[in-house]
Each structure stands twice: as structure tokens, then as C-alpha cells.
Image (spheres, grey):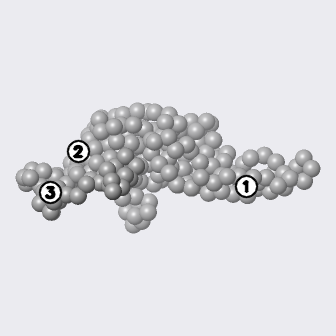
Amino acid sequence: MPPLLLGNIRPFGKTYQALRDLIMPISADQPESIPWVLFDTQQYAAAGSATLSFFRSTAANLNDQTLSNFPTGMLPKNEFFEMHRVFVMIHSVPNINVTGVITGAAQDVEILHKTARGQVSWTNAAKNYGTFPLFFFGRPGGPLPFYAGVATGTVATNVVTAGQTENNGGFPVLGNQIIPEQQPFSAQLTFNSTAISAATNITLAIMGIYHRQVR
């Protein structure tokens, strides 16, 4: 019987020695290299915000690991991060309104892109990159809600709105930038400050390869 095919992966057994070689560094100069995501979260105010700064320590993010895993923006000695994809997640929650006009969550995401005209940039080892339009920074995944209206005659009495960005794979850095050890890294979202329906958290996340010392 032929071996089971898992998509395009053809599994083969490995010897115990081969497995030991994979988990043991060849030399003391070889770091552990693993897929990783660095992320930080800031809040866009309901009244509008001109700039959101990411990976700069805030009390809330230091104390809440659901908001950030890289709040200080600096890697320790002998640690490097190879950037591959940059994502932006807008944490808009579906809402219900009773007008015939789409307002709330769906409109907020539209405003952030088209009226506030969000722009993304970052600073790595004292060099600036960007700005780039928010449209290029999709979300990695997550909920994909829908909205529906219930109408009487020509007037909608209940409308559920949900705002989401496109799952476009993120901005492709593709390993061409590396966050070095012991140097500050930060990112910014800048806007033409425009009011939205409610204060909304925005997360900027970087997917890549984390190189760190084997301990």
C-alpha cells in the first residue's frame, strides 16, 4: 500500500539520529530559528487619532499579553527577527442600528481607509520605511461576519453591520529586513484624523522568523 499523501507532503520516517541532529545546533554560533509573530495594539479614538505608535512601551500593553508580545520594541542580545509579512487588524465589533443607512462597524473600517486615509510606516535600526497605504496591510484571518437588514416597506428597522479588512496575505517584506539585537524598532499608523462611531483597537503584527540563542 502506498504511503498516505497529505496534500503535497509525502511523509517519510526519519532515524532517531536524524531527529537528534535537527534539534541540536551544529555549533554554539547556530541560533534556534522558528516561525513567530510580533504584535502590538493601540486604540484609535472615537473622536479621531492622527498617529498611533506601535512597539513603544505602554502600561496597558506591558500588563496584557493579548494586546502585545513586543511592547518595548527591542530584542535582547543574540536575538534577531527576520520580517516576512506585516498585517493590520482592525478590531471592529458588529453592531445593530435602526436606520436605513449603514453606520457603525462597517462604516468605521471604510472611514479609516478612505476618509482618514490610514498610512503605515516603521523605523528599524534608525532607518525609516514607508509610508504605505493601509489598503496593502490586510488581516491574517479571524472572523468573517455578515450583515443583514429587516425592513418594513422601504425603511430598514434593524441593520447589523460588520467591518472587516481583506485577508490579502499582508504586506510582503519577504525576509528583506531584519530587526537586529538591542536596537529600537517601532511602527506608526498615521491618519487624517476623522471621528468614528466608537474607540477601536488596531493591532499591527509582523510574521517572520525569530532567531534566538539556544538555551
Alpha-carbon distance for marks 1 and 2? 45 Å
The residue located at (40%, 33%) in the rendering is: 130
Residue 190, image x, y percentages: 49, 40
- Quarter of the rendering containing residue 194: top right
Q: Quadrant of the C terminus?
A: bottom left
Instruction: Tell me if residue 81 can be seen.
Output: yes
Alpha-carbon distance for marks 2 and 3? 31 Å
Judged from the image, the secondary structure of the residue bearing numbered disc 3 is helix
As drawn, the label of residue 160 is 1
Asked whether, in this view, residue 146 is left or right of residue 132, the answer is right
- Quarter of the rendering containing residue 125: top left
The residue located at (44%, 63%) in the rendering is: 66
| In the image, residue 65 above or below residue 138 | below
What crowding class fits label 1: few (fewer than 14 Cα within 10 Å), some (14-19), or many (20 or more)?
many
Residue annotated with mark 2: 180
**Which amino acid does the dot numbered 1 rest on?**
Val
Asked whether, in this view, residue 12 is left or right of residue 61, the answer is left
Disc 1 versus disc 2: nearer the observer: 1
Alpha-carbon distance for marks 1 and 3? 55 Å
The residue located at (86%, 53%) in the rendering is: 151
